Amino acid sequence: MNDLLLLPQPRQVERLTSACVLKPDCLILLDSAIPQQLRFAALRVQLALRQHADLAWAIVASAATPLDQIGLILRVAPSRVTQPQGYELAIEPDRITIEAHDAVGVFYGVCTLIQLLETRGSTTLPGLHISDWPDFSVRGVMLDISRDKVPTLETTQALIDRLASWKINQFQLYTEHTFAYRRHPEVWARASPFTGEEILELDAYCRERHIELVPNQNSFGHMHRWFELSQYASLAEAPDGFDFPWGVHSTGPFSLNPLDPGSLALVTDLFDELLPHFKSQLLNVGCDETFDLGQGRSRAECARVGAGRVYLDYLLKVYEAVKARGHTMQFWGDIIVQYPELISELPKDAIALEWGYEAQHPFDERGWQFAQAGLPFYVCPGTSSWNSLGGRTSNALGNLQSAAKHGLKHGAMGYLNTDWGDNGHWQTLPISYLGLGLGAAYSWSWEANRAADVPRVISQFAFDDPTGNFGRVAYDLGEVYRTLDLEPHNSSVLFWMLQWPLPEVREGYRETVPPERLHAALAAIEHALAPLNETQSRRTDAAVLRREFELAARMLRHAAQRGLFAIGAPTRSAAELDRDLREIMAEYQHVWRLRNRSGGLGDSVARLERSWRDYAV
């Protein structure tokens, strides 16, 4: 059914010969033993009928209502729809019926109906029978709020509304130091964190939309913000610095010392303050990228029993602390897969999060490892937005598709799509929409969505633009990275050309990126941005969206021109580059504040300022 545009695309659709003409003054019937569970879904479709069909349909819960007055039935019928979260949507000449296994299935049926109303914009809907249910019982999104950018509550709620419409049912805020811990105020003093009150509000907001807000607090690596303060410095594994696996030396600490009892005491103290704000019984403890393990205070013990054993022993202590608090532990699986002989020792009620962000990430191999050990796991791809400025479209689609395909193959219980903010969180939020939308589609039904018309579907359902132009801009701007014929791991060349000092750009790319490739990138940027003035977004923030894409394009453009300057083929002088980057920094700060809190902005802009100082004239 090529004319049926939905996100996600349902798995089974049958077209009927007769259309459905929606009539005025009909009723929405809640047919359930507990009709209150369906009220929010009914309110959503009631609003959509008013907005897109100019119809005012009242909501009732009485089965005594005359049938000829009912325009829409929302019914919980587990005996008819056997798949959890599944629904049947029948759009027939006389009325619309949504039957579902449970209340969340009714909500998902309503989400599909609302999308049909949005795309049709009239009182006539095509006659359809849709049977639909998810591939993965858990379909989540994790948003990084610890690498400088902390969104406002309003921004976060708007994103959650969008994700809920795509049938996402889990949401996490990746936290290192950006929850307002009352017992640790110094660590978040400049970060504009989420407060306990805000999390309580957000938790209720998510639950109403059938989304589980999962607490997330890294508990081993990525603790460097804490070690900047003297009262936590003694807990560091490598206080004098360490070497990253890729050869770069860090002058400061990164991970907790797993042998110090104070490390576990700190993280359990954080759990005790954080967890009461969430209804969820899950807890993501992180414990990823412990690069410095064995390079400092645990060196002797790692030499004696092995770094894998030291890591696992600490992880098991964290597990016991989580379990003692009545929660189930999620943890990133990148360290334990390096020691496959230890995977079987993990408790079978812990959940491994198998993450990887390249199109060729070995989800197949890693999924097999966890499945063989009988350990529940999620596949965790990403949006490919970070370290890119404008996204990496082809990589994102390959990564997201591979996670769905191989997660299904090996019985993954969940699919957690991640959106990170490494190195200053320079990308604007809409750069991530393409990856977020397609991740939702692939995790709902891989087969039904694998051939989706990406620009068209993202334009319609991420940007509310029926012309397809917004989706085309997002897609093509995310392909600019490929014009350089060089794809560094988890990043793009243009990102590093803007972030690195000029001598490093010269040294790193003079021999590998010829000037003609940078000129091709400049042309690709202009081509990608050209449809922006033809967009017709109905979103209330449409002007902000355009401004965010213009900023991303300008940063990409400056990066290419900076690269040409660095490798000795300049098209702009140092003075011109100086002026351009000063203007970019001013716009960057303004755009940041449109969706995000001020905490972290100074750190993020400082990275641009370092590059700007290279142009001193």
Image (spheres, rainbow, N blue to C red):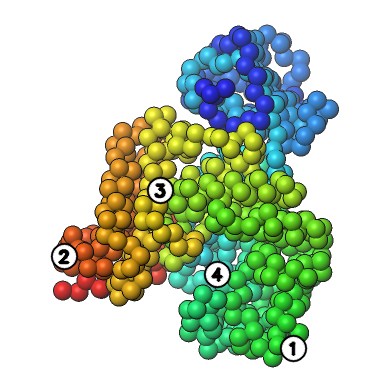
Q: Which residue type carries mark 4?
A: His
- Residues at marks 2 and 4, CA–CA distance in whole angstroms: 41 Å
Neighbours of disc 4 within 10 Å: few (<14), some (14-19), many (20+): many
Residue bearing mark 2? 573
373 is higher (above) or lower (below) than 300: above
Q: Quadrant of residue 108?
A: top right
Q: Earlier in the sequence, mark 3 or mark 1?
A: 1
- Residues at marks 4 and 1, CA–CA distance in whole angstroms: 33 Å
The circle drawn on residue 177 is 4
Q: Which residue type carries mark 1?
A: Arg
Asked whether, in this view, residue 595 is left or right of residue 335, the answer is left
Residue bearing mark 1? 304
Q: Residue 52 versus residue 349: which sits nearer the camera?
A: 349
Asked whether, in this view, residue 510 is left or right of residue 96, the answer is left
The extreme bottom residue here reads 300
Q: Earlier in the sequence, mark 3 or mark 4?
A: 4
Regarding residue 591, the answer to whether it shows in the image is: no
Is the residue under label 1 in contact with that under label 2 (CB below 8 Å)? no
Residue bearing mark 3? 479
Q: Under tag 4, what secondary structure?
A: loop
Q: Which residue type carries mark 2?
A: Ser
Q: Under tag 1, what secondary structure?
A: helix
In the rendering, at what x and y percent does residue 531 appear?
32, 37
The circle drawn on residue 522 is none
Neighbours of disc 2 within 10 Å: few (<14), some (14-19), many (20+): few
In the rendering, at what x and y percent does residue 409 appear?
72, 47
